[in-house]
Structure formats: structure tokens, C-alpha cells
Amino acid sequence: MQEKPYFCPNCRSNRVKFSVITSYSQSFVKDALSGNITEFKEPDAIAEPEPTIQCLVCSFTGNELRFIKQAEREPRMNTTTTTFY
């Protein structure tokens, strides 16, 4: 994953709450008569060229570059805050 800001291209309100979705393959063997699982193998991660990101506000899912490009199109501006006492 890249160290760049994200911005959800769907809801256009979320810049902070995301999850990365990864895929795994896990082999197993079943008994032909009973259907019971007799053997499990360790899961293997499926290599993906680009991470899949999900917005935790609206559940939109897309590739990482889409979230990065949206953040570049609409950058967050730093603003100063004045505190009154």
C-alpha cells in the first residue's frame, strides 16, 4: 500500500476510515461419502498487482489508485484554528 492520502470517490466524505481486502486460497480434502473435511492446508495469499480498498463509511470497494487519484483531485487543505478564551 502506498503512503498517500485516500479520499472515497463514491461518498466523497471519507478520508480516514478504510480497510484493505486481501484474497487467500485454502485447499482442503473432503470425504466423498460423508462430506466431512479430512484435511486442511495452510492458506496462501493470492498476489494482487494493486490492493483493493473499501471505504468504511459507504462500503464502496475499488483499487487503491482510484482512492489516491480522488484525493489528488480534491486535496485536503490545512487550516489554522483560532482558540478564543
Image (cartoon, helix red, strand yellow):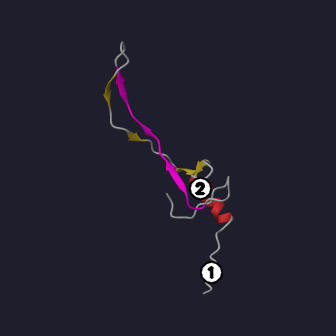
What is the CA distance from the residue labelled 1 to the residue labelled 2? 32 Å
Type of residue at label 1? Thr
Looking at this view, is 76 or 56 the one in front?
A: 56
In this image, 59 relative to 46: left or right? Answer: right
Q: Which element carries disc 2, helix, strand or loop?
A: helix
| Residue located at (56% from left, 61% from top) | 16
On screen, residue 62 above or below 43: below
Q: Percent position (x, y) of residue 36?
A: 35, 20
Question: Which label sits on residue 37?
Answer: none
Name the image quarter holding residue 33.
top left
Mark sitting earlier along the chain (1/2): 2
In this view, the residue farthest toward the front is 85
For this orientation, the residue located farthest to the bottom is 85
Which region shows up in magenta? Answer: 15-30
Q: Residue at x 32, y 33 (%)?
A: 41
Under circle 1, the secondary element is: loop
Residue 32: x and y, percent? Answer: 36, 15
Magenta highlight on residue 19: yes
Residue carrying label 2: 65
Label 1 neighbourhood size at 10 Å, few (<14), some (14-19), many (20+)? Answer: few
Circle 1 sits on which residue?
Answer: 81
Question: Residue 2, relative to residue 61: is it above or below?
Answer: below
Q: Tell me which corner region of the image, top left, top right, bottom left or bottom right, holds residue 31.
A: top left
Quadrant position of residue 42? top left
Residue 83 in the image: x percent, y percent? 61, 84
Residue type marked 2: Leu
